[in-house]
Structure formats: structure tokens, C-alpha cells
Amino acid sequence: MMPEPHAPARPVALVTGVGRTAGIGAAVAERLAASGWDIAHTHWTPYDTRMPWGVEADAVDAIGAAIRAHGTRQLAVPADLADPATPARLFDRVTAELGPVTALVMSHAESVDSGLLDTTPDSFDRHFAVNTRASWLLIREFGLRYTGPFGSGRIIALTSDHTVGNLPYGASKGALDRITLAAAHELAHLGITANAVDPGPTDTGWMTDAVRTDVLARTPLARLGTPHDAARLIDFLCSPAGQWINGQLLQSSGGFK
């Protein structure tokens, strides 16, 4: 009796910022798992502790179970991305336990509302450390270690154009955009595409009733964006069919103005 052939190896996607079941990161990780990717994902509980929504008990376990339900290998890694040593350690662990990374999806963020007059230097520096510096270091590690077939590598950054009343977040995301778009050209010799996706206001549990009303009034489709809207686009960009989209800042917000 002939032995059954081994199933082909699944590519590995590293998705950062996957700490809440209602978040974009969780939707992206599960969607990619359903499309045939093995998934490594990061979370950082101290950030959720500081935020209004607080820590979601058992979220990491629930997200992991949803990912594994698609027959994928899954690895959850706590990661303090304010520490510049974290990206290299993260890639070391993911590579050792799952294999080389083929897609990097950066959904992590420091996001604390403040404006020009009330932002503190500490808050400003933390936003840039997490949203900008860590993203650059993650992209750098990915580029230094990439061994996949030419044309298969993917970098996708979740970004935002929000600035008024949200100065450090918006400014740090603007810098992230430029780093990501540069990667499309500087990593061209590896065949890695790089795009930034702006999903617009997304219903992940942070909106007040007033914000919901305002967003609905400014969205032609008269509904709120969901994490699955962003996940569907990112899934496409990570697929072979999405290869020709490269070096772009993509608006995926239902026409929100």
C-alpha cells in the first residue's frame, strides 16, 4: 500500500496586534487561516489594561481556537513592541516554531486620543515607538530573513488618516505609511509587495453612540465598517491574485468622508 502524500506546507503569516476577539487583527488572522495560512499572532495585555475597553478575559485562547478550527498551526506570542529588541526576538521564535514568515500584517497600535495642546512628550514618544519604530523594525527583520519564492512575500500595514484630536496616533501612522511604501521598492529584489490599508472607522467596540451616529451619516452605504471588511481586503492582498497591487495606500472605508 502506497503511503499517502504529505500535504504541502502552509505559508506562515505573522499578524501583530491580535489581543481582542472584536479587533481587526483577530478577523485578519482567522481569515488568513481559512485561506490556508499558518498563523503567528502577537498580543500585549498591558496596553489593553490602559485602554477604556480593558482586558478581555480568555481572548487569546478564543482567537487561537478559532484559528486552529481551520486546520492551521497557530502560535500566540506576547510582544511589547515599545521595546526595540522585540521584533528580532519575535521573528526568532516564529521562525523556530512555525518556519519562515511569508506575510507580515501589522495591526498593532498605540492609540490614545490627544491633540496639539495636550499631548505629552511621553505619549508622543510611545506612539512613535510602537506605531512607527516597531513597524520599521518588523519590516526590516522580515526583509533580512525572507526566503520565500520571488513574488510571494507580503507586507501590509493597517493605517489611519485621523489627525485632529488624535495627533500622536495620526502622525505616527503617517510615518508608517511612508515606511511601508518605501518597502515596496527597497525590497523589490526579494519580490515582496508592500501596501498600507486604511479601513476607516471600524466597529470594534470603541465607538460612543454619538460617534456611531456621525459615522453612519458620513458613510454612503449607511452602515459601520467591520473588522471583516478589512480582513477580506487583506486576505486578497496576501493571495496570488493580489500580487499586482503594490506600493499603495488603499482606502477601504465604504466611502466615509
Image (cartoon, rainbow, N blue to C red):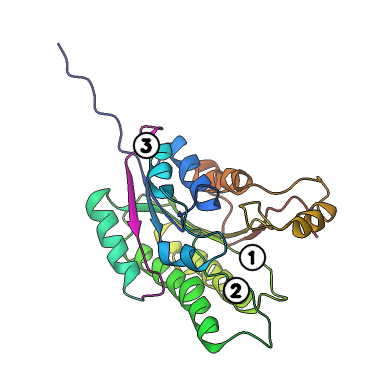
Mark 3–mark 2 distance (CA, rounded to whole Å): 33 Å
Question: Residue 203 at what x, y percent from top left?
Answer: 66, 51
Q: Please state if 97 lies on the left or on the right of 133 as rendered.
A: left
Q: Please state if 58 lies on the left or on the right of 255 as rendered.
A: left
**Screen quadrant of the C terminus:** bottom right
Q: Which residues are magenta?
A: 68-83
Secondary structure at badge 1 equals loop
Question: Residue 132 at what x, y percent from top left?
Answer: 50, 74
Report which residue position mark 3 lands on: 68
- Amino acid type assigned to the residue bearing label 1 in the image: Ser
Secondary structure at badge 2 equals helix
Q: In this rendering, is residue 243 above or below 50?
A: above
Query: Which circle marks residue 109 in the picture?
Result: none
Query: 10 Å neighbourhood of mark 2: few (<14), some, or many (≥20)?
Result: many
Report which residue position mark 1 lands on: 160
Quadrant of residue 166 within the rendered picture: bottom right
**Screen quadrant of the N terminus:** top left
Report which residue position mark 2 lands on: 169
Mark 2–mark 1 distance (CA, rounded to whole Å): 8 Å
Question: At 43% from the left edge and 50% from the top edge, which residue is drawn?
Answer: 57
Which of the marked residues, 2 or 1, is nearer the chain's N terminus? 1
Secondary structure at badge 3 equals helix
Question: At 37% from the left edge and 36% from the top edge, which residue is drawn?
Answer: 68
- Amino acid type assigned to the residue bearing label 2 in the image: Tyr
Quadrant of residue 94 within the rendered picture: bottom left
Would you say the residues marked 3 and 2 are in contact, meaning their CB atoms lie under 8 Å apart? Answer: no
Task: Inspect the magenta stretch and tell me whether residue 57 lies in it.
Answer: no
Task: Inspect the magenta stretch and tell me whether residue 80 lies in it.
Answer: yes
Query: 10 Å neighbourhood of mark 3: few (<14), some, or many (≥20)?
Result: some
